[in-house]
Amino acid sequence: MFFENFKLALKSMWTNKMRTFLSLLGIVIGVGSVVAILNLGQSANDSIMESMEVGGLDMVNVIPSGWSREATFDEEFSQNFLVNIMGIKDVVATVSSTANVRYGQERLSTSISGVTSDFFEVNKLSLLDGEFFTATDNINRRQVVILGSDVAEELFPAGGAVGKYISIFRTQSKRYLVLGVLEEKDATLGASYNNGIFIPFNTYIQRFRKTSQVSSYTIQVEDGFDATKVADDIDEYLSSITDSDTYTIFSPAQLVDMANQIMTTFSSFLAAIAAISLLVGGIGIMNIMLVSVVERTREIGIRKALGATPKVIRGQFLVESITLTITGGLIGILFGWLISYLIVQYAGWALHFSWLAVILAMAFSTFVGVFFGWYPAMKASKLDPIQALSYE
Amino acid sequence: MSDAVIKLINVRRFYLVGDFVVKALDGVTLTINKGSFTAIMGPSGSGKSTIMNLIGCLDTATSGYIEIDGELTNDLNESELAFIRNQKIGFVFQQFNLLGRLNALENVMTPMVYANYSSRERRDRAEEMLIKVGLKDRMKHLPNELSGGQKQRVAIARALVNNPAILLADEPTGALDSKTGDQIMTLFESLNDEGKTIVFVTHDRALGMRCKEQVYIHDGRIADQDVFRKF
Ligand SMILES: Nc1ncnc2c1ncn2[C@@H]1O[C@H](COP(=O)(O)OP(=O)(O)O)[C@@H](O)[C@H]1O
Ligand SMILES: [Mg+2]
């Protein structure tokens, strides 16, 4: 019986293709929005989780704008952060520029950074081989270097970088002992460690630049403190001691917050669209079903004469409206998937296909089918057989 | 062999139209026996269809008793009436009343869908019935691809498919030319020969006379033949 009803429903949908399509638009848009919300929510979440793993959400970067002369590195300045702002574990200063490096016949131009020994820990970098330099190396201005994975691969295609000396040119050539090679790490928010090399901060100052202007401070936030809050505090503090645009403050956590905020706004927007479209779609279904009941008054009369009980007639029309809405739901799933695909492409996330979305979409469309199909189906089931049979 | 399959006792069917009471049936008492072939005759508006609809459980009486195949139908609810229509009654209408979107075979299978036969049984029996009414090579045709006579044969096959106790035909030849009508009448006669109880409404005197019994109706009452002849 159900199968018969289902076949009938498909038949009548097919005979009124255009009308069916139009009446399904609301459901398609509604379900599409629900699917998109869930797919995107999950995709955004995945991408946030990923940056947490890679980037370290406990970091705040302070970058002097335009090599401002005020932005200098000294112990006092670092100390000031620690004293004035709650929740800072460590401050690491970095100076960087570019240099040419060579080993044997291999040579390349790369970014070179002078960093203190805790830079590696703060940035959650680990070694593939060798060891990091120490605070003592920094104080002694040793000529040692840690290579990013790409650099190591280019200079030492055969491996075995640790313990070798490479030449770094900057007005004159100097030999640096390779202490370690970094493990490959995905770029986070623009910073890639794979194609850089790292020498002790003091060595850099002595060899490459006489002033102590800093390229950036990396500030590690203490466990249990909100990195976004700390970033705001730093901003406030720096604004109070210098011009507000001397430094740019930059934290992965802030970006994640921002992404979350955008997602929330976007989700509420889509949820509103979903709710309205499902309502409008449902009313559309009710309307089309009422039209269908009127058009098929005679058919209902005939079926009753042949022994269809009111329940059977009701069932027939309910199956029909559910078939309609589920068809709308299926199209909506494709539609929602398309929307999420486009947005994810734009946002640069990986698309997460949410099965929950499919299940919810199906549940929603079934519900709309039952809820808005009920009244027309009741109406059909209550038709008087004789009047229905004499309907022209 | 004269046990009653239909009994109407003092049946009235009144309609209220505005302030008027239309007495479509006004006290009809009638017994129809198993295996009979009864013509119900009378002028237009005399109440023939009203009787058929009451016997067929499509309508309920204002007062009186109606017994179908031993069952009193007065107090049955919608679903119970639907069950009787499905199991005990086969209806054939003047306007054929086939389901336009279904082919001949599907039309004939429909009453069995409501009786919960398996799809195999439905198909077998529907085919059997269509062969019986002479439409072996028209099973997959839609109603609008069939002639009037063929449509009525499909309708008859459909009415017979659940093997009902009573076959009700309300002016089944009314929309057909006389030759086709005659063929349909012949089909009814052969069905009656096989034992089917048939109630046959017509205002065609010749056709009515071919039935075994005649009931004359006038202004919602049974009239005797002599009175009827005067009209
Ligand atoms: N739904 C109705 N409302 C009012 N009057 C009706 C209705 N149905 C039938 N009638 C009246 O009942 C009488 C009998 O009708 P009907 O049984 O259809 O006659 P017949 O089939 O003999 O031509 C007619 O006068 C008709 O107008
Ligand atoms: Mg009539």
Image (tube, coloured by chain):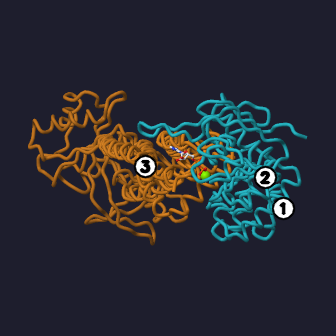
Measuring from the top left, give residue B23's x and y in whole percent: 55, 39
The answer to whether residue A139 shows anywhere in this view is no
Q: Is residue A219 left or right of residue A27?
A: left
Q: Are marks 3 and 1 on the same chain?
A: no
* Chain identifier, orange in the render: A
Q: Residue furthest right?
A: B1
- Amino acid type of the residue that numbered disc 1 sits on in the rendered structure: Lys
Residue type marked 2: Leu
Which residue is under mark 3?
A287
Q: Give whichever of A378, B154 is nearer the camera.
A: B154
> What residue does disc 1 label?
B132
* In this view, A172 is above or below A363: below
Do the residues at pointers 2 and 1 share their chain?
yes
Mark 1 or mark 2, which is nearer the start of the sequence?
A: 1
Q: Residues within 10 Å of mark 3 (few under 14, many from 20)?
A: some
Which amino acid type is marked by label 3?
Answer: Asn
In the displayed structure image, the side of residue B168 where residue A29 appears, left or right? left
Residue, x 51% and y 49% (percent of image)?
A: A293
Label 3 SS: helix
B121 displayed left or right of B76: right
Query: Residue A32's spot in the image, x, y percent?
Result: 44, 51
Q: Which mark is residue B160?
A: 2
Q: Tags 3 and 1 in contact by the CB under 8 Å rule? A: no
Residue A196 higher or lower than A300, as above or below = below
Closest to the camera, between mark 3 and mark 1, is 1
Mark 2 and mark 1 in contact? Answer it, CB < 8 Å: yes
* Chain letter of the residue carrying label 2: B
Please identify which colour was used for chain B in the image. Answer: cyan
